[in-house]
Image: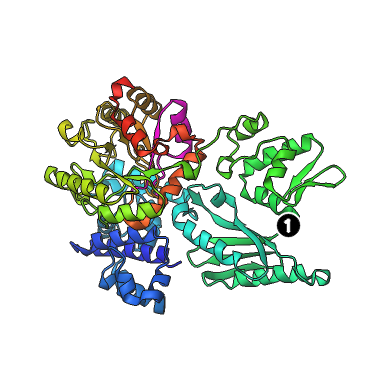
Amino acid sequence: MLNLKIAKIFYQMAELYTMKDDQFRPRAYEKAARLIESMEDDLEDIYKKGGLKGLMAIEGVGKGMAEHIEEYVKTGKIKNFEKLKHDAPIDLDSFSSVEGVGPKMLLALYKNLGVKNIRDLEKAARAGKVRSLPRFGQKSEENILRSIALSREHRGRFLLGFVSPIVLKMERELASAPGVQNVLACGSFRRRRETIGDIDILAVARPHRDAKQGGQAKNSRAIMEYFCSMPNVEKIIARGDTKSMVRLDIGIDADLRVVPEKSFGAALQYFTGSKDHNIELRKIAIRQGWKLNEYGLFDKNDKYLAGKTEEEIYKKLGLDWMAPEMRENRGEIELALAHKLPKIVEYAEVLGDLQMHTTYSDGAHTVEEMAEVAQKLGRKYIAITDHVGHLKIAGAMDVATIERQWREIEKLNKKIKKIKILKGCEVDINPDGTIALPDKYLAKFDVVLGSIHSNFKMSRADMTKRLIRAMENPHVDIISHPTGRVIHKRSGYELDLEEIFRAAARTKTILEINSYPDRLDLNDLNIRRAIEHGVKLSLGTDSHSKNQLHNLDLGIAQARRGWATKKDVVNCMNAEELLKFLHIPKARL
């Protein structure tokens, strides 16, 4: 899939143009990269079907960018990008995952300290040379070292949301390959972890008409041949009749195993994991004198007891089957043994999306376009939550624009019958915790999201007070992306989360599970902590394009990993129930 490669190139082109003090192109390339990386449709497929016009139909991709993509499809490179890299003295690749080290900072570090790559930067910071530079200081130096350590921690892991289309496409293609009876991706992908290190796929070969002459083995070899020759395979690492490993062109490894039908459930359970979950299951089997592995469950005489399905494995061991998202050895096994597992929220139970942006602020598509795509995805309602407040770079709306948007939403609600459009906003939380829009306007929205978009480096105590004061505002319904983290890039601001959860419960403020692939904030552990405090949760895709609205499933998966039930997630209410819930004065709830 071409999307991740092009997105990475466009991000780097944005940084390279920033170094050249270009006033327009950095923002344009960054915006295009952000839209492209979360698209479900493959850019190469779009180009093959519609050529340059097909690419230019993608919002945010102009003629020049479309030509870049065309050039990459044809040649595997973009001359303009290669020239920009050649002219730049810095290896941007090595800095791509280091938080807070932007192109202008890098240029200053190069000019003053000769820093060309991440090794040079770490060496200079450890020697105390960075703090002596103008506009830096000891705090900047410490943050740089912390960011370098964080980037190493995440090295080799890929965001679930950006890899999902690739994995699902591989599943579909393998399912239609010659000789395949069943195929499913497992591992951390099936558990829906926010990042994955590799792709594990299981398959069962169809019975062959020449079974007595080893026909099924022929089907297995045919599956392996198909897998190793898939177009996105860059390198074959290992190849066999029942197991092969390849490296895909985006840099992630993928394994395929072909297992017997009677072992498929056991193998699926085993290779889904997690490791700690599996260890506990094996202990339960051992206590009964049995053996559990990827081939099945066996008694002490190696008699096969179960293994065709996961359900029969768990049942034979005395446990209720549980969703893959729960399998992290965090208490789920004990509850399954006692038949007291919570009924976690189902994907189909989530009816709406409570954060998205349109052309009224920094989105790529109109309110109507977002509503039409959301309706096709099965949503019953959406909240349009364009920016208001101080975030001018994100096109924050003024009062006149807000009122114009309200009029349009009212018209669209009469025109589009199968989906309800809520009047919402994402408003800035000021450093002192006040809200960057007067109460008289906040009171008129159907739903108000409060967000921190500035002053991330406040102390733990001050940031906690800031967020609590915002929650105490009677018009703030939801705190969006509550910890401010960006996976692989920013660890989030300092907060006393126990205080935050207590305050959210006290003020009846909803906390968001932001479904954008590099946020997924709250994370799974904090979701569980919030629920224990009685806090309600919301789901919002934070979409800035109609091509990102499918990301709601990522947020639902995160909610499931945090053991959220239907009653914990406000998006499971229908539109009328939700509006009624939101309009009850917070103090009375």
> Where residue 319 appears, x then y in whole percent?
68, 35
- Quadrant in which the C terminus appears: top left
Q: Residues within 10 Å of mark 1 (few under 14, many from 20)?
A: some
How many discs appear? 1
Where is residue 80, by image quadrant?
bottom left
In the rendered structure, the answer to whether residue 419 lies left or right of residue 523 reads: left
Residue 503 sits above or below residue 418 on the image: above
> Where residue 138 appears, x then y in whole percent?
30, 41
In magenta segment, residue 355? no
> Where residue 120 appears, x then y in whole percent?
37, 57
For image coordinates 24% across by 27% down, the residue present is 473
Please provide the residue range marked out in magenta.
518-542
354, 498: nearer the viewer: 354
174, 201: nearer the viewer: 174
In magenta segment, residue 522? yes
For image coordinates 62% across by 30% down, the residue present is 335
Residue 509 sits above or below residue 11 on the image: above
Residue tagged by mark 1? Answer: 261
In the rendered structure, the answer to whether residue 580 lies left or right of residue 317 reads: left
Residue extending farthest to the top is 588
> Where residue 308 appears, x then y in whole percent?
73, 51
Amino acid bearing label 1: Glu
123, 339: nearer the viewer: 339
Where is residue 207, by image quadrant?
bottom right
Residue extending farthest to the right is 301
For image coordinates 41% across by 53% down, the residue present is 377
Query: Which of the colour schemes (rainbow, by chain, secondary structure, one colour) is used?
Result: rainbow
